[in-house]
Image: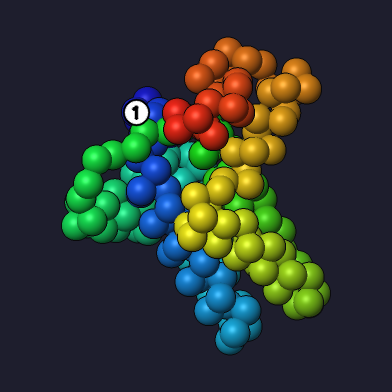
Amino acid sequence: MRTLFRFPNPVNETSARLVAGGAVLQCLTFVAFRQWWMLIPLTYGFVARVLTGPTLSPLGQLSTRVLTPLIGGEAKLVPGPPKRFAQGIGASLSVAASVAWGFGNHGLAVALVAAIAVAATLESVFGFCLGCTIFNRLMRWGIIPAEVCESCNDLSRRFAGSAV
């Protein structure tokens, strides 16, 4: 059980981008069809990935075990803590969207899912992790201690081609 609730560190960026692409598809499907039940796999996926990385996430398993090996290429490893933080933002927004929908505020639910879609599109298409950027800013402000992720304490490393 101890290893079940563990987030990988480092994370394969290709897998992270594929998961983000899957989240984009889920979000766009929900926004297009606006069926409450579509929030269930979206919310479950984010919560599962925050708690266990890809272990209990069907999308995480598909990305890490099937799609990433199919794509091949050299793995670019990035720090796990910022990716987990980003998944946490997605989990918070998707849970909030589910609650909003449950209370009849469908517009808010759609807006929250659309926000997830924007962030996930940035990650999937451009490799820009908005949650990772927020994580780094919180580290700079001293809200997240540097020892949580020493390799990502310097944002300039990402732009120099190193990990986040």
Residue 82, image x, y percentages: 55, 34
Residue 110, image x, y percentages: 70, 74
Left or right of 151 in this view: 143: right
**As rendered, which of 162 and 122 lies closer to the eye?**
162
- Residue pointed to by mark 1: 3
Q: Residue at x 40, y 28 (%)?
A: 9
Of helix, strand and loop, which one carries label 1?
A: loop
Residue at the farthest front position: 160
**As rendered, which of 41 and 110 lies closer to the eye?**
110
Camera sees residue 157: yes
Left or right of 85 in this view: 2: left
**As rendered, which of 50 and 151 lies closer to the eye?**
151
User: Where 27 sits versus 122, above or below?
Assistant: below
Residue 116, image x, y percentages: 63, 60
Camera sees residue 65: no
Q: Residue at x 42, y 39 (%)?
A: 52
Residue 129, image x, y percentages: 57, 46
